[in-house]
């Protein structure tokens, strides 16, 4: 029997997939995101009274938290993006951005508890 690789030691699990649970996880584990999370909530949902934007809001912040809760992975992705921005070689920049995008995609698909 094979098992999926677990999350790295010290990385908190993903919360229940709900806005209150995600907010609590951000406050507890990645407080540097909290002000932006709350400002974005007000701008996109609360101040507009438009709950139709809730799924997009949750998807965006789910991925933000999934990356930020793992500082090593977050640094790696930021490094890839920075190296791409500084690269004078379009093919190299493209490859770096594709690698970063694959990581963003992978973490956005994580489920609760992962």
Image (cartoon, grey):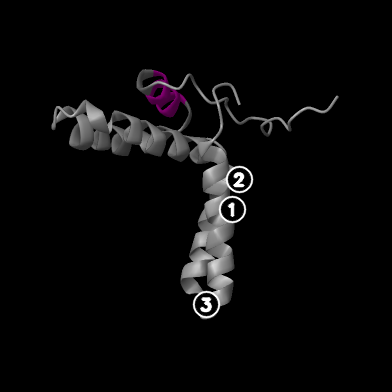
- Discs 1/3, front: 3
Distance from disc 1 to disc 3, alpha carbons, whole Å, reads 20 Å
- Marks 1 and 3, the one that precedes in the sequence: 1
Q: Which residue is painted at 21% across and 30% down in the image? A: 45
For disc 2, the marked residue is 72
**Could you tell me if the residues under marks 1 and 2 are in contact, i.e. CB atoms within 8 Å?**
yes
For disc 3, the marked residue is 90
* Residue 86 falls inside the magenta stretch: no
What secondary structure is the magenta-colored segment mainly?
helix
Q: Is residue 94 above or below residue 56?
A: below
Q: Which residues are magenta?
A: 21-28
56 lies left or right of 110: left
Q: Viewer-proximal residue, 78 or 56? A: 56
Badge 1 element: helix
Mark 3 neighbour density, 10 Å: few (under 14) some (14–19) many (20 or more): few
Q: Which residue is painted at 36% across and 19% down in the image? A: 20
For disc 1, the marked residue is 76
Mark 1 neighbour density, 10 Å: few (under 14) some (14–19) many (20 or more): few
109 lies left or right of 33: right
Q: Which residue is painted at 82% across and 28% down in the image? A: 2
Distance from disc 3 to disc 2, alpha carbons, whole Å, reads 26 Å
| Residue 24 picture location, percent across and down | 40, 21
| Residue 8 picture location, percent across and down | 68, 34
Residue 33 tag number: none
| Residue 31 picture location, percent across and down | 40, 32
């Amino acid at each position: 029997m094979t098992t999926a690789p677990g999350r790295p030691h010290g990385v908190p699990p993903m919360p229940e997939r709900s806005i209150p649970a995600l907010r609590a996880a951000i406050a507890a584990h990645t407080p540097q995101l909290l002000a932006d999370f709350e400002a974005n909530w007000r701008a996109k949902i609360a101040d507009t009274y438009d709950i139709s934007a809730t799924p997009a809001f949750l998807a965006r912040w789910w991925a933000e938290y999934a990356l930020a809760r793992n500082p090593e992975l977050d640094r790696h992705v930021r490094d890839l993006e920075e190296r791409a921005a500084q690269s004078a070689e379009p093919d190299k920049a493209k490859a770096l951005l594709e690698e970063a995008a694959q990581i963003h995609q992978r973490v956005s698909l994580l489920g609760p508890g992962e």
